[in-house]
Image (cartoon, helix red, strand yellow):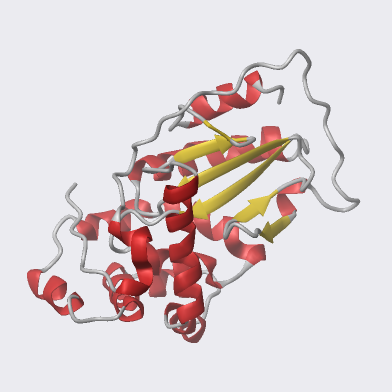
Amino acid sequence: MKLRTAATAPILGLALAMLAACGDNSGNSTSAPSNSIAATPAPAGQDWTQVVSKTADGGFVMGNPNAPLKLVEYGSRTCPTCGNFGRTGTRPLEDNYIKSGKVSYEFRDFLVHAPDLGVALIGQCAGEGPFFGMLEQMFVDQDQFLSKLETVPADFQQRLQGMSPAQQATAWVEYLGVIDWAKQRGLTEQQARQCLADPARIEAVAKVSETAMRDKDVTGTPTFILNGEKLNAASWPQVEEALKNAGA
């Protein structure tokens, strides 16, 4: 699949100037501990998958905030490898590891392809509560968006050249049908367009990618980090093996 990247404006800086390919990641898995980690009960009336908050690093985290194992994913919503992890790994990760209180899971949007900014803005627009449900559904429905990227009209690409980042983000999600998709899941069109036009949101989303490349050696998606160490993993079986080796 060939994805054509539109010209970007200075506000996106390094985050969009040095983007790498989906599926490229490297690192070392964590070593196995001597003892397994004990489960931690969730607050009364809840399970840990219902505990979601936005983080200082620009991601959204699900689970026990004091979980001994902290899994972070840098992912692109248009990355097929990320989509495969979302479709195959989300439920077992939640049911077998997050609900036990042993593992927390943070997702940070990493901008790889031209539409990623707008799609990430829509995915984050509704806030903390709906975030992971929206993320999972985006990956379930990913093929319908990717099919439209197989052949992007030349006149559409030309129009993008003179647009601001906010205008480009809006144009891409309109082209992909993401606004209508989000409306079917509780986000109003007004909310969606306000998020797409918000300079502070745009800068915050772009900054996550910039910081990840500069400070954390993130070069592609998906990149998984467990307790600060980058994993040599791109699929759910590989991530699960790392979690088990770490005592989950």
Number of numbered discs visible in the structure rendering? 0
Relative to 221, say whether 181 is above or below.
below
Q: Quadrant of the C terminus?
A: top right
Relative to 189, say whether 93 is above or below.
above
Task: Identify the image quadrant of residue 98.
Answer: top right
Kindly give the residue lying farthest to the right in the view shown.
Answer: 44
Kindly give the residue lying farthest to the top in the view shown.
Answer: 34
Relative to 154, say whether 166 is above or below.
below
Residue 221 screen position, x and y as percent:
39, 43
Task: Identify the image quadrant of residue 247.
Answer: top right
Please indicate whether residue 160 sits to the left or right of residue 247 in the image.
Answer: left
Residue 62 screen position, x and y as percent:
67, 50
Kindly give the residue lying farthest to the left in the view shown.
Answer: 154
Residue 195 screen position, x and y as percent:
48, 79
Please indicate whether residue 245 sits to the left or right of residue 1 in the image.
Answer: right
Q: Residue at left 70%, top 57%?
A: 52
Please indicate whether residue 212 sits to the left or right of residue 5 in the image.
Answer: right
Task: Identify the image quadrant of residue 32.
Answer: top right
Is residue 214 in view from this perspective? yes
Q: Residue at left 29%, top 71%?
A: 172
Q: Residue at left 8%, top 69%?
A: 154
Taking depth in this image into account, of 76 and 187 the one nearest to the observer is 76
Q: Residue at left 43%, top 41%?
A: 222
Residue 39 screen position, x and y as percent:
82, 31
Please indicate whether residue 149 sits to the left or right of residue 18 in the image.
Answer: left
Kindly give the residue lying farthest to the bottom in the view shown.
Answer: 190
Is residue 184 in view from this perspective? no
